[in-house]
Image (spheres, rainbow, N blue to C red):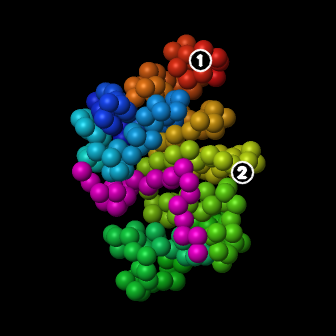
Amino acid sequence: MSVLSVKNVNKRFGGLQALNEVNLEVEEATVHAIIGPNGAGKSTLLNCFVGRLMPDTGNVTFDGHSLLGLPPHEINQIGVSRVFQTPEIFSDLTLLENVMIPAFAQRDGAFQLNPWHSVSDESEVSGEAMEMLRDVGLSDQAQDIASQLSRGDKRRLELAMCLVQKPKLLLLDEPTAGMARADTNNTIDLMKRIAERGVTMVVIEHDMHVVFSLADKISVLAQGTVIAEDLPEKIKGNPKVQEAYLGGAHL
């Protein structure tokens, strides 16, 4: 069953047609990768999913709800979480505090930087946050300041911050960008565990090792248009994809 549906989405910036009649169906409890060369429109499309951009025409629906016109915090409240290219964490807070903030926000229905005053059961939320840190392998560092983490661990912390909100759909924009291979492989393993829980994921990624390790289905964007969509093994041999993405070389 499709949980995210993109219908005839167009987006223009001046003379640049960033998205051109994009159609996409993301099935529930799958990992759907979106790949393509730089400037293909991948991040623009993702921004249309989370309320950062409004398509000129077309529609985006999640779980039967149109996302158009909704502010980002409302999209988050109905079950959509996003992981950015650069990890977005509270660098001056501990890892535990970083995860407690979105946990409180999920309960309160609004994001607050000082939410402890609005909910009395801090110990319960702290327990939820610790459980998420254990899930991502960071519980031993719960009281460390987040700025001290490596890039790979910052990514794991950000994933814990998303997972504590119990998302139905997780959007990941270049989740392994800038990582060493060991951190990349650890992130792949973590994302596999998340997928096994039934969380639907949409992943934008340039690293083909990551894509083919995770994806159930792949959509290929080129110049704002979906030129192919198929199973990973079929995408590898698609001549249009090879031409658009790698100048004719094999994936």
Residue 73 painted magenta: yes
All told, the count of numbered labels is 2
Residue 1 makes an appearance in the image: no
Upstream in sequence: badge 1 or badge 2 = 2
Residue 206 painted magenta: no
Q: Residue furthest front?
A: 15
Up-down relation of residue 33 to residue 131 (above or below): above
Q: Residue at horizontal 67%, vertical 75%?
A: 144
Up-down relation of residue 184 to residue 36 (above or below): below
Q: Residue at horizontal 57%, vertical 26%?
A: 232
Q: Residue furthest right?
A: 182
For the residues carrying marks 1 and 2, which lies nearer the camera in this image? 1
Is 166 or 20 nearer to us in this picture?
Answer: 20
Q: Label 1, on which residue?
A: 247
Query: Residue 19, how many percent across, how many down?
Result: 36, 32
Query: Residue 176, how many percent across, how many down?
Result: 63, 46
Query: Residue 194, how many percent across, how many down?
Result: 56, 51
Query: Residue 55, how many percent across, how many down?
Result: 28, 40
Q: Label 2, on which residue?
A: 183
Q: Which residues are magenta?
A: 69-92
Q: Amino acid at mark 1?
A: Gly
Asked whether disc 1 touches disc 2, contact meaning CB atoms under 8 Å apart, the reply is no
Asked if residue 124 lies left or right of residue 27, the reply is: right
